[in-house]
Image: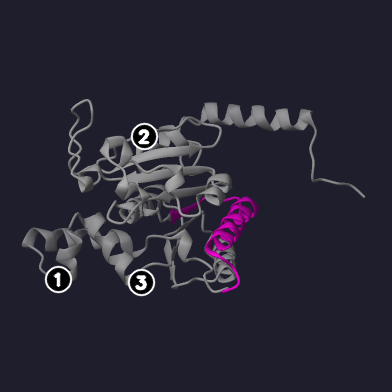
Amino acid sequence: MSDDSYINMREMLKDCISDVQERAINTGVPGIPTGFQPLDDLIGGFEKGKVYVIGGRPCMGKEELMLSMILDIILESKLPVLMFSTNHQKADYVQRLLAIHCDILVMHLFQGSLEPHEWDRLDKRTGELVDAPLFMHDSLDLPLNELVETARNCIREKEVKIILIDCLQMVDFTNEDDNPSDRVAKVMLSLKQLARLCNIPIIVGSMLSRGIEYREGLEGKQPQLMDLMNSSFIEGLADVIMMVHRPEYYHIYQDDNGRNLRGLIEIIVRKNALKTIGQHFPGLS
């Protein structure tokens, strides 16, 4: 009985050189573009079989960043996306997607108080989203088995190429026998397995602890890996961990070099498996 669970060095080198040659021909990023070139240069886009974690405190813009990435993937790369909404209703995210795409304040959409030029943009740009390949599933306290089953069905039936989950800590909180650390560990392990087996990237948002609020200074307010809730399991299983930080929220308006930080969201890559770490300023507001 043959065992195909291992491979010899000759075959591994052959596959490795083939990958290098293919990437030399294809000058684009190895994975699905994020919509932010400096971030793509750092992490190589969203690569197949990997799990990406985006952490952030409330009001930092974590969800807006994820929605901006979704818009780029469905409109520019034109790839089918499945999003699990565990923290908000589908209608809330659709409204925020529309606000980002049409460059309109979400509050204006919520109140229906649009200026004439905003109504014009809404009329012109809404049509671009009508046939966009985005599929959304919303469920508070989403059971893990339901998430996995839904993901596999969408991959098979809708040819989904990337999955996003808005909040890791809101998944599989139905088993009262497990503590939060055990639940997060089970979810992360299942997501890692799903990404590998289905050969797609999975991006998941994560809450951060309040420890940041009690630290001082520019660097003190920047989120660290230890700020991830149940961080040890997330650190070990995620391939890439990036933090979303808005210095202006903490009344920090410039960095040590005098760079203006007003209206900017800072993305800090804290883990980047087999690659470098760093940060960049995408300029979201």
Q: Amino acid at mark 2?
A: Gln
Q: Nearer the viewer, residue 84 or 162?
A: 84
Is 25 left or right of 64, judged from the image as shown? right
Question: What residue appears at the point 79 percent right and 37 percent down from the top-left corner?
Answer: 7
Q: Which residues are magenta?
A: 176-205
The image quadrant that residue 118 belongs to is: bottom left
Q: Residues within 10 Å of mark 3 (few under 14, many from 20)?
A: some
Q: Amino acid at mark 3?
A: Gln
List the residue tagged with mark 1. Answer: 111
Note whether residue 285 is visible.
Answer: no
List the residue tagged with mark 2. Answer: 279
Q: Is residue 172 above or below residue 243?
A: below
Q: Position of residue 50 (x, y in %)?
A: 56, 46
The earlier-in-sequence mark between 1 and 3 is 3
Q: Residues within 10 Å of mark 1 (few under 14, many from 20)?
A: few
List the residue tagged with mark 3. Answer: 89
* Residue 18 sits inside the magenta stretch: no
Is 70 left or right of 123, judged from the image as shown? right
In space, the residues marked 3 and 2 are separated at their CA atoms by: 31 Å
The earlier-in-sequence mark between 1 and 2 is 1
Disc 1, disc 2: CB below 8 Å?
A: no
The image quadrant that residue 269 belongs to is: top left
Q: Amino acid at mark 1?
A: Gln
Q: Position of residue 168 (x, y in %)?
A: 47, 59
Is 152 left or right of 222, judged from the image as shown? right
In space, the residues marked 1 and 3 are separated at their CA atoms by: 18 Å
Name the dominant secondary structure of the magenta segment. helix
